[in-house]
Structures are given as C-alpha cells and as structure tokens.
Image (spheres, helix red, strand yellow):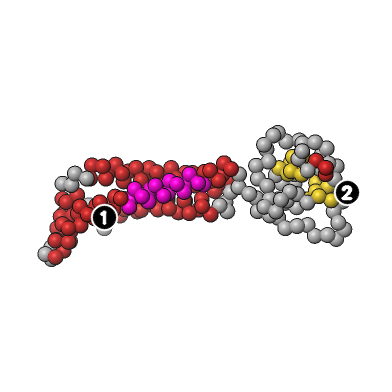
Amino acid sequence: MPIQFQCASCGQPIEVDDEHAGKVAACPFCRHVVTVPAATTLPAATVSARPAGGLAPVWAQTPPVGGVLPPVPAAVPSPTTLTLANLALVCAVVMLVCYAVTFTVVARVAGPALQRAIAEDAPSNEQIRAFEAALKNAPEMAWIGVLSLGGTAVALVGLVLAVLSLRRHRALARAWVALVLCAAPPLCMCSGLLMNVAGGPGGG
C-alpha cells in the first residue's frame, strides 16, 4: 500500500510504495531529499497531483554520491481542475454557437435593407437607421435578443471557470483557450460602451 506524506521543504504531497519505508527519497516537485516515514501521514485522497514521470525516486539510505537528481517534472492537474477547464471550454463553445446564430439571423433580417440603402448612395446615418428599422420590425428579434444575452451570460460563467482552473494549474492549455474566448465578448461590450460614452453629447 502506498505511503503518502508531505515534503518538509515545499509542502507538496508525495507518494511512494510502502516497501521504501525508512529510506530517503527525492521530492519530485522541489528535489529536496526527505526520509520516507514508516506509515502514511496524510489523510486519504490528499495526493491529488503526481509528477508526470511517476513516483518519487528512492535510494536505500542516502542519495548517490555525486549523483544528479532528476529534473522536476510538471505536476499533473487534478480531476477537479480538469473538470473546471472542460466546463469552461464547453461554455466557450456554447457562447460561440449563440453568437453565430445571432449574427446569422441579424444578417438575414437586416442585410437586404442595408444593401438597398448602400445601393441608393444613402448617407451613413440613413444606412444605420434602415438597418435598425429592419431589426426593430423583425419578429425574430424577440428571441434573438434573449439568445445574445444568454451567450454573454455563458461567456461570463466560462470566464470564471477558466480563471478558477488556471489558479489551480497555470499550464492547462484548454483553460487558456476558454479564457481567451470567453473574455472576448465582455471586453468588446466594454469597449463599445466606452466608445459610446466618449462619442456622446459630452464627448469630443
């Protein structure tokens, strides 16, 4: 049965086979040499991350004279961290689907009116009014607005999940992908709001 104990140097949990009790081992996280206790000193299921290369290297009594300790392997993300990252990625995909449907319907509903205004050489403000009027009169906009807000809400949830995952394991690629995708809509909305404020009656 494996022996689980805590590294006295870095505090990370270490796991070795019980046949190595009383021997010395190199912590796979900080390479500090520690003595393996006779029995487990950590509660059950405490060791949630193990080095990618396996268990800690163990020597009979002391490390080899002049020997080189193995490089510090990357910690494996815990199941909870992977779940958070996967959920964040799912939120990012759902958000992209919501926005893709929204933009497709908006283009189908208001695109012809905008194209007519452009073909008639109408001023830009009239083109915008034609576009807005087409959207306002379209029955699809009732559920498209809800879908757009839902996509933004899902993006915020994914953003929180991605941040929580990266706080536990910063090298998780899927969490970074979800973070970038889910952060884009809130940033665009904030940028648009700032531009509207700057271009309002009190601006420039």
Q: Is residue 124 magenta?
A: no
Q: Which dot marks residue 199?
A: 1
Res. 123 image quadrant:
bottom left
Kind of residue at badge 1: Gly
Say left or right for 133 vs 197: left
Residue sitting nearer the eye, 35 or 126? 35
Badge 2 local density, few (<14 within 10 Å), some, or many (20+)? few
- Indicate whether 33 appears above or below 46: below
Q: Is residue 146 left or right of residue 21?
A: left
What residue lies at 45% left-to-right and 46% top-to-bottom?
90
- Toward the front, the furthest residue is 1
Q: Indicate left or right for 197 with 153 as reference.
A: left
Q: Amino acid at mark 2?
A: Gln
Magenta region: which residues?
85-100
Mark 1 lies on a secondary structure that is loop
Q: Sequence-wise, which precedes: disc 1 or disc 2?
A: 2
User: Residue 59: which disc?
Assistant: none
Which residue appears at 35% of the width and 53% of the height?
A: 188
Q: Which residue appears farthest toward the top when viewing the image?
A: 43
Dominant SS of magenta comes to helix
Residue 34 percent coordinates (x, y): 80, 46
Q: Is residue 90 magenta?
A: yes
The part of the image, by quadrant, that contains residue 152 is top left
- Above or below, 166 against 204 in this view is above
* Residue 188 visible in image: yes
Q: Which residue is mark 2?
A: 61
Q: Residue at x 83, y 47 (%)?
A: 24
Quarter the N terminus occupies: top right
Q: Quadrant of the C terminus?
A: bottom left
